[in-house]
Image (cartoon, rainbow, N blue to C red):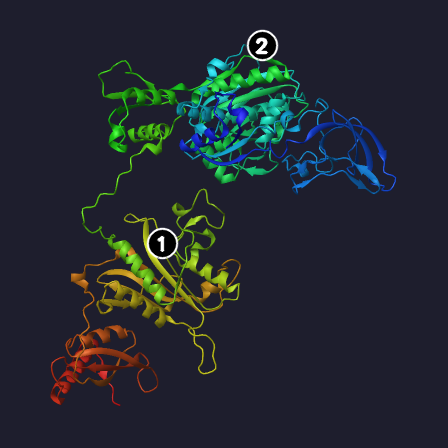
Amino acid sequence: MKFTLKWLKQFLVTDANLIDITQALTDLGLEVESIIDRSVELKDFIIAEIIDIKPHPNAQKLKICKVNSGTEILQIVCGASNVRVGLKVVLAVPGTKIPNGNFAIKATSIRGITSDGMLCSEEELLLNSNDNNNGIMELPPTATVGDSFTAAFGYDDPVIQINVTPNRGDCLGIYGIARELHAKGLGKLQLVDDNFKTSTNGHFKSNIKLKISAKDTCSLFIITEIQDINNACSIPSWLQHFLRNVGLKSISSVVDITNYICYSFGYPIHAYAKDKLSNNEIEVRKAYANESIIALNHQSYKLDTEDLVVSCSNKVIALAGIIGTLDSKCKSETKNIILETGYFLADSIMTTGRKLNIESDARYRFERQVDYNMASKVHAIALNLITSICGGKISETVVYDDATTTPAKTLEFPINEFEKKTGIRLTKSTIINILGNLGFTISNIADDTSSILKLEIPSWRSDIAIKEDIVEELLRVYGYKFLPEVPIKSNNQSFTALPSKQQNILTIKRVAAACGYNEVITWSFMNSKIVKYFSTYNEELKILNPISQELDYMRPTIIPNLLEAIAKNQARSLKNQAFFEIGPVFSKTETCNEQCMLAAVKCGNKELMHPHSSISQWNIFDIKADLEVILFELGINIENCKIIDTTAQKYYHPGRFGSIMLGKTCIGCFGEIHPEILSQVNFCGINITNRVIALELNIDLLPIKKSQYGYKKPIMISNYQHIERDFAFVMDKCIPASEIVTSIKQVNKHLIKTVEVFDVYTGDKIDNNKKSLALRVTIQSNDQTLTEPIIKELSNNIISKIEKKFNAVLRDH
């Protein structure tokens, strides 16, 4: 929000200087972002007039100008194409510093002719106007020769820019800012009703009819017709200066006045060219399906039935509260206008503005909620300002007002609440004084015995709802600097540990990094066009107002986001990649809508290229090993997990996939991304060519009860010799090797230390539906040296269990 110091003083009578005002604004929570004061660097420039022009004898493109500075006639050589006799210009005499380049003007000879100064362009003065970029700056004929340029054109008025938080829409008008400074004690507020003409008398009855068809989103709408205006007249210099200094380009007299009202009171109003309307009925309604407009920014927009519009004869003349259309634009030749002031539902304005990506001063204020009670006042102020500047006759005002939608909000505030929350004791009179200056009405102010104040919240403070809000209001006006410094209390107890879920996340991040993964953070959205490759499409997960068309669906899995990261890096010739992300995924079920997941991917070669060994790509056994390490560090014994391959997600290769079951709960999965997914889906316009392996782990299902599923135990190192025995069993192909390994370990948990699969054979020597699984069993005792009878008995038990449980046969070697 930008405004000038003089503009502020239209609404605040104050002797405070610029430094005091800006400090008070920051203390009030309206952080000052910048102060632009051009008065120092432009102080030496003066207004002059060209009285004679002669061609330069030695340069065809240069001219010799005689310039009246108000005190003397100077000779200046100039090459601008727009110099002419009688033109009022900005003159820099010798010694003046030019802002663009920071160099001082000197009297000098240009191609043999003395030049006693320079005629300046807007670019040289670092002014933001785009009216004339082809030559020197042209001043209006009314400018007075010899006057200071800065004073005559308002550049001696500092520009202040503040950061207004989303809850303080009341400070998007200079009147609201003045009200805040008044409460802080920096001056007296010029009340609207006392200092502005807030009523009008119509001279005729307009034939304009008003129809409100969208009463749920428009609770107030005021229109007035003004006839026979001069929209090409010159607006007052003070108004020109205010608008120019905050970066608003002059459009026409009426539009400039509506912009002034918008910035002054934070309430947008709009003017239509009446003669461009096809009939006399104005309707506020919802747009028709596929209705389209060309807005004042010359952009075309397609509307839907949720968008609020103002129409005339079924033709849209404005997107309500956001922007007008080109068809109803007020131009300098416009003679008759209709002035509109409305109050629209903030959520409706915000939704339409975001969907259509339209930024405007009107939308910025309406979506933060304007003051309902100011509507009729700013409408009257605008009417009076238009007729006083542009002339014309105003009609009787037509009003739709559903006042029942805006009841006054009340709140009870205990006097001692402020001290309880801040440690600062304020007297009742001080609290009443601060709240009164902020606009609160206190209904029981005369009751000296009451310890509770009954407050009516100001209509412009839609953000006030609870007593803590009142504490904040009192504290920011009284001053945060008065908060007492209190040391943090300590009871010498240790801090509470992080919740188990956060501990798990930190553990996973540490282990994943140790396994060579890089953490990435991607959007929680994805492109709805590729959802079908990764999940079942659900319309309820479609985003109504996406930040872009490529991110319009709540992701059901993180995998596509990681694949996109791989594609982006492949486009930069980075082939070996390993990424992980922990974040939310979304579904629409009766029991769950959002879950926290770990997803990780690897792509490329395991090692860098070197001449001493062959290079191999990552495979599912590598990603399975990473998952086992993560589970181990989380305190989950992988031996208590079961790996099944019957429920592959559609984006995994069905023959290279496994789900991790802990009891009856699936806590994660791993596998190779289906090659067809990689070939069919373009990620950032790129098809991934290398194999990609991935894992997923549902963090919300962790931790599991350690008493049920085991935990890490201290490692016991035996001093006795270990031995190895190899077994090969012929069994059905469908039997998972992990079940064989688990069953062998269960034969004797004290003696059997490890079971490893070292070979799988299918071929001519066994049946087609069979496989031979070769396993190496490491046997060791913690108490004694193993004897042959013990080893033989254990081997027979292993053979017997596997043969009986899996209908397997020990294979002859």
Relative to 102, say whether 160 is above or below. above
Quadrant occupied by the C terminus? bottom left
Q: Nearer the viewer, residue 692 or 647?
A: 692
Residue in the picture at 25% in, 43% down: 488
Q: What residue is shown with label 2?
A: 204
- Residue 24: x and y in percent read 43, 30
Say left or right for 757 vs 616. left
Label 1 neighbour load within 10 Å: few <14, some 14-19, many 20+: some
**Which amino acid is tagged 2?**
Phe
Can residue 369 be seen here? The reply is: no
Q: Is residue 399 visible?
A: yes
Q: To which residue does mark 1 refer?
A: 583
Q: State the residue in front, 538 or 695.
A: 695
Q: Does 302 appear above or below 761?
A: above
Classed neighbour count for the residue bearing mark 2: other residues with Cα under 10 Å, few (<14), some (14–19), many (≥20): some
Q: Amino acid at mark 1?
A: Gly
N-terminal-most mark, 2 or 1 = 2
Residue 218, given in percent of the width and then of the height, sits at 45, 25
Q: CA distance from mark 2 to mark 1?
A: 65 Å
In the rendered structure, the answer to whether residue 316 lies left or right of residue 664 reads: right
Horizontal side, residue 755 vs residue 166: left or right: left
Q: Position of residue 699 (x, y in %)?
A: 29, 57
Q: Nearer the viewer, mark 2 or mark 1?
A: 1
State the SS at label 2.
loop
